[in-house]
Image (cartoon, rainbow, N blue to C red):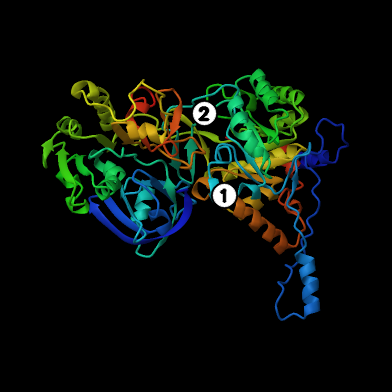
Amino acid sequence: MKAKRRVVTSVGRPAGAKRTPTIRRIRPAIVPATPRPLVEPVVAPEAANDAVEATSGEIDLTVDLGRGLVLPNPIVVASGTFGYGIEYGDVVDVDRLGAICCKGTTLKPRIGNPTPRVTETPGGMLNSIGLQNPGVDAVVEKYAATWATWKVPVIVNVAGESVADYVAVTRKLEGVPGIAGIELNISCPNVGRGGLQFAIDAAAAGEVTAAVRRATDLPLLVKLSPNVADIRPIARAIADAGADALTAINTLSGIAVAPDRRKPLLGNIYGGLSGPAVKPVALRIVYEAAGAVRIPVIAIGGVTELADVLDFLAVGAVAVQVGTAIFADPTLPVRLVGQLEAECRRVGVPSHRDLVGSAVLKRTAAASAKGVEYRP
Amino acid sequence: MTMRLAAAELVDSREILPGQWLQAYHAPDIANGSRAGQFVHVRTGDYSGMVLRRPFSINTADAATGIVTIHFRVIGRGTEWFTRLRHGDPIDLLGPLGRPFEVDPRSRHLLLIAGGLGMAGVRMLADEAIRDGRQVTLLFGATSAREVYPSSLLPDEVEYVVATDDGSLGHRGFVTELVPQFEGWADQAFACGPMPMLRSLARLAEGRRGRLGVASLGRKRGGGRTDLLGSTAARRKAFLQVSMEQNMGCAVGACLGCVVLSVTGTPQRVCREGPVFASDELVWDGAWS
């Protein structure tokens, strides 16, 4: 009891103390105590007009990630699930998305891992693509011109084996029309040296972020791995190194067994788990990361419907990425944009930003300061 | 025809062999314009448990009636879910996907080779070939007589030759052992089935010219430009085209889950560059096969 109270008071310490307040001040949502009544056709025209004015003003879904990158809405398609944005063709209207994160891109072409590379698991899937991609030069040459014609910002997911790799890829993306930002993938669990070594260590994560930060003025997102004991020091190191936003989470490392039980199913043995099964883990990491840093956090992990989007906003995310669900329902991200707008209208807020952080308790700092003992 | 998301309705579902089902869906958008070798990616109703669609070869497609059929074996929860569908149930299809079989316009004699469920991959090509006035011989391999695809479900014009592992019907042994009898007769061959079967067929096809001294159709190998990997021309000129299978994620080329290795060392997406490949475009040995 005493310990808890002591940590709570630390929230109020003046800035400059080592542990600065970790909750970003969230504007109080202007949620009316009772839901606004729906406009009934029987209401007198005057009153009806007033009601409409109150609830049907423009809903502002934009998300400002800094350095001029403003997403038109907070629904982003996740790296590796949407290719380079062209694969779904007419099935998806990309210009209605908040942003596209393209497939992980490395300096040199990579052929990826042996097959099988994907398999379904209960409520999710394992993948071990192994960063197959044609290399940054080919990506820029083949796709950037197309991206430049789109309204939707395209964020290039950058992967590498060394700090020099990340910096080299970043330099090649700098100043290319059509590239709106960089998502630093330091968390691919599927290749021997896929950068995961950077995501599990705060000092290394800070080092690679700082190196890339020095190399570019592009908006810089850094994608966190859930395969760590405590995300908060890593998130802080990345934020301190100059990242503009965090993306959480990448996949969880896992294994599936072949039907004959004579070997692991995936050609690479290990795969990354995604889908609804990982959502509780993603919620925890977003909750902790958002509490630890002042930069925006983009949530990803098991979003399949509006309720999931609202959950992630509630724990402090400013935007969400949709990944695995696209495979079953390619039009889901575009529909979520409309549903989120309708939800803002329903609860009577002018922007989805008013829904952010609603489930973050004041006590967050206390709980997180207690460390990791609640984990196995 | 470009792919689309189409709402379909189950019109017929029956178990044609133990554990193997033939289902007919009313999906005019898909039936009209799809070709042999292409596939559909079908969503199950239980998204929270089964996050992936299931790919099925288009078994037959009838543009006049708008009926598309699929043929599958119950191997897991997804396929089991499909068997519980009733007449009139709605379903969500993404398709038609992938590149089709390419028949050289000059080919008169087509050899189709199917192993087990591989029948679903080549079945529609029999319809197309007969419509175009070609002769079709279909070699079919199964473990035993009770697994043999019923001849009543094939067009009458098809010559149907069966091999079973236990000899309970037709030739005793692998279906690949029947191929030498027909490789001189056939202008082109098209195969779908288990990987070992496709691998041995690819080896047979490789040595065929040498054995038979068959004049190759079209431009001679090495005599001009080489066709782009995965191109229509490369398939059309090949003696053997194979329909490949891989665990699939998105089925549109975005996730890179379903690749096979090509002779140039680059992975090819089964869903996009395939599922039909010229057999000489692929690597048949090694960690990826």
Residue at image x 54%, y 49%?
A: A90
Residue at image x 39%, y 26%?
A: B288
Instruction: Give residue A366's position: percent from left, percent from top.
Output: 75, 41
Seen in the image, is B276 located left or right of residue B175? right
Residue in front for this viewpoint, A77 or B205: B205
Residue A314 in view (yes/no):
yes
Which residue has dot 2 on it?
Answer: A132
| Chain of the residue where label 2 is placed in the rendered structure | A
Q: Which mark is residue A113?
A: none
Q: Residues within 10 Å of mark 2 (few under 14, many from 20)?
A: many
Q: Quadrant of residue A83?
A: top right
Which residue has dot 1 on it?
Answer: A92
Residue in front for this viewpoint, B85 or A202: B85
Residue in front for this viewpoint, B116 or B223: B223
Mark 2 and mark 1: Cα distance apart in space: 23 Å
Instruction: Give residue A351's position: percent from left, percent from top.
Output: 76, 55
Instruction: Give residue A273's position: percent from left, percent from top.
Output: 51, 38
Judged from the image, the secondary structure of the residue bearing numbered disc 1 is: loop
Seen in the image, is A364 located left or right of residue B225? right
Residue at image x 75%, y 51%?
A: A353
Q: Is residue A236 above or below residue A85?
A: above
Judged from the image, the secondary structure of the residue bearing numbered disc 2 is: loop
What amino acid is labelled 2 in the image?
Gln
What amino acid is labelled 1 in the image?
Val
The answer to which of marks 2 and 1 sits earlier in the sequence is: 1
Q: How crowded is mark 1: few (under 14 residues within 10 Å), some or many (20 or more)?
A: some
| Chain of the residue where label 1 is placed in the rendered structure | A
